[in-house]
């Protein structure tokens, strides 16, 4: 008969661990509950761990130490796959605990997925899915948990999970657009920087040796280039270390509330960059708030969730101020308009939605509009960035080439004389 290692709490609250035999895991849970214990975790024991001690009432059985399971978490992509598969299983009529058990053994692995198994165990202990998800905030954000709570209240968990899948797919599309827009310029920048570094460290010092043997007077651009090349060659590691230290200090500063606020405020002021940041943030704000309100999440709770996930400290502070004003009984549109950060288009469309009783629909239109605006901003950004980078790199390479040619012409002229 299979053996199960367990961790439980007695009626007095003491923690106890041991091994018991049962037909399956559910039978093991029932046996523990029948003894008056509250199961914390029950996992199948290793078959090679020796003979099992039978479970008896009064907790007179052999105990053994079970090391804590490795803490697991989901990445964004894994959470999306998990949500989609769980929605499909629930829509097919499968019970929640059974669906989680199926997903835990997904892929035929010998060991179940630790995070999904923990969710399954929590459901078997009588917790709701939202309560089980709250135990893993690193994998499931507040937005996800609030949506699940709304689904539990309405009895439409499968539909809510499908909406979550759609929401996260749209958010992922927006992120991918921004990343893909930066790939080509980044490649051009790295290739150009690599070419310049190679020239400064290996090519120009060889020309410098030749020019030194000829003992001629070098033009000013050539002397500047050779001097900079010698600095890179002799002190390159020092400069690299200083750059790394500066990057580390900047990262620590940006990790502070003051630094993050300053950086996010600068993003909202930079030309071209501002339009991308604003369009992305406003689209995420509108779509997330629309999804929450459409599923029955209260306004104040919805604003608190959006504040945490908006991704820009300036906008998050404005949403927090608006939430405080909403507490006083005002609408959403007026507090947002009072701050002057959100554009009139958003506040005006919100006001229309409030008058017609369809705030979620108005927010959805806002999200679609700013997603289209994001596409245009990204195209403008890439159209400007690519030629700027190419011209800048061409100018630097041209300066190197012209500096060398001027020196060569100067030397050959002197030799001819």
Image: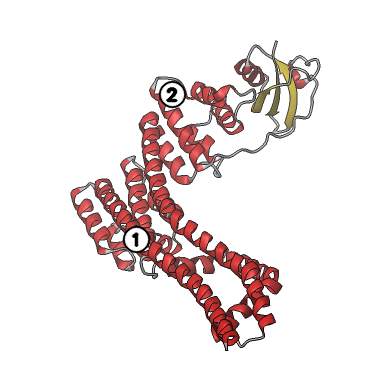
- Total marks drawn? 2
Q: In the rendered image, which residue does mark 2 sit on?
A: 89
Which residue is found at the position 32% from the left and 53% from the top?
Answer: 375
Point out the frontmost of discs 2 and 1.
Answer: 1
Residue 383, disc: 1
Viewer-proximal residue among 46 and 247: 247
What is the residue that sits farthest to the front in this orientation? 416
Residue 293 in percent (x, y) is at: 33, 45
Which residue is found at the position 36% from the left and 46% from the top?
Answer: 298
Left or right, 52 with reference to 354: right
Residue 17 in percent (x, y) is at: 74, 27
Q: Quadrant of the C terminus?
A: bottom right
Mark toward the start of the polypeptide (2 vs 1): 2
Q: Is residue 37 visible?
A: no
Residue 75 against residue 389 in the figure, above or below: above
Viewer-proximal residue among 194 and 291: 194
| Element at label 1 | helix
Residue 3 against residue 125 in the figure, above or below: above
Left or right, 137 with reference to 240: left
Residue 60 in percent (x, y) is at: 79, 19
Viewer-proximal residue among 112 and 320: 112
Q: Quadrant of the N terminus?
A: top right
Q: Is residue 409 visible?
A: yes
Give the CA distance from mark 2 to mark 1.
45 Å
Residue 359 against residue 74 in the figure, above or below: below
For label 1, count other residues whose C-alpha is less than 10 Å away and answer few (under 14), some (14-19) or many (20+). few
């Amino acid at each position: 008969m299979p053996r199960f290692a367990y961790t439980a709490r007695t009626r007095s609250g003491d923690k106890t661990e041991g091994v018991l035999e049962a037909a399956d895991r559910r039978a093991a849970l029932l046996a523990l509950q029948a003894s008056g214990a509250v199961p914390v975790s029950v996992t199948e024991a290793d078959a090679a761990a020796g003979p099992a001690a039978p479970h008896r009432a009064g907790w007179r059985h052999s105990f053994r130490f079970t090391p804590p399971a490795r803490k697991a978490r989901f990445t964004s992509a894994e959470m999306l796959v998990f949500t989609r598969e769980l929605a499909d299983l629930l829509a097919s009529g499968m019970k929640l605990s059974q669906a989680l058990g199926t997903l835990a053994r997904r892929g035929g692995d010998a060991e179940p997925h630790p995070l999904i198994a923990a969710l399954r165990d929590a459901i078997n202990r009588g917790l709701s899915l939202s309560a089980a998800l709250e135990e893993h905030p690193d994998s499931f954000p507040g937005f996800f948990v609030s949506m699940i709570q709304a689904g539990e209240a309405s009895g439409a968990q499968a539909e809510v999970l499908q909406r979550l899948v759609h929401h996260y797919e749209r958010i992922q599309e927006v992120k991918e657009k921004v990343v893909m827009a930066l790939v080509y310029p980044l490649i051009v920048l790295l290739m150009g920087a690599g070419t310049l570094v190679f020239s400064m460290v290996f090519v120009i010092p060889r020309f410098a040796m030749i020019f030194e043997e000829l003992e001629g007077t070098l033009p000013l651009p050539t002397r500047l280039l050779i001097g900079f090349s010698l600095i890179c060659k002799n002190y390159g590691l020092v400069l690299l270390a200083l750059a790394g230290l500066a990057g580390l200090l900047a990262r620590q500063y940006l990790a502070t509330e003051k630094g993050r606020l300053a950086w996010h405020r600068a993003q909202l002021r930079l030309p071209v960059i501002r339009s991308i940041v604003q369009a992305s943030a406003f689209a995420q704000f509108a779509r997330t708030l629309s999804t929450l309100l459409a599923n029955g999440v209260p306004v104040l709770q919805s604003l608190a969730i959006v504040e945490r996930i908006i991704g820009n400290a300036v906008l998050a502070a404005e949403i927090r101020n608006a939430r405080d004003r909403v507490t006083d009984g005002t609408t959403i549109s007026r507090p947002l308009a009072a701050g002057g950060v959100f554009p009139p288009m958003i506040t005006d469309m919100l006001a229309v939605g409030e008058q017609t009783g369809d705030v979620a629909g108005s927010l959805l239109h806002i999200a679609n509009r700013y997603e289209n605006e994001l596409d245009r901003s990204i195209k403008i950004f890439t159209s400007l960035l690519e030629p700027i980078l190419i011209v800048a790199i061409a100018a630097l390479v041209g300066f190197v080439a012209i500096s060398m040619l001027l020196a060569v012409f100067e030397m050959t002229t002197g030799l001819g004389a």
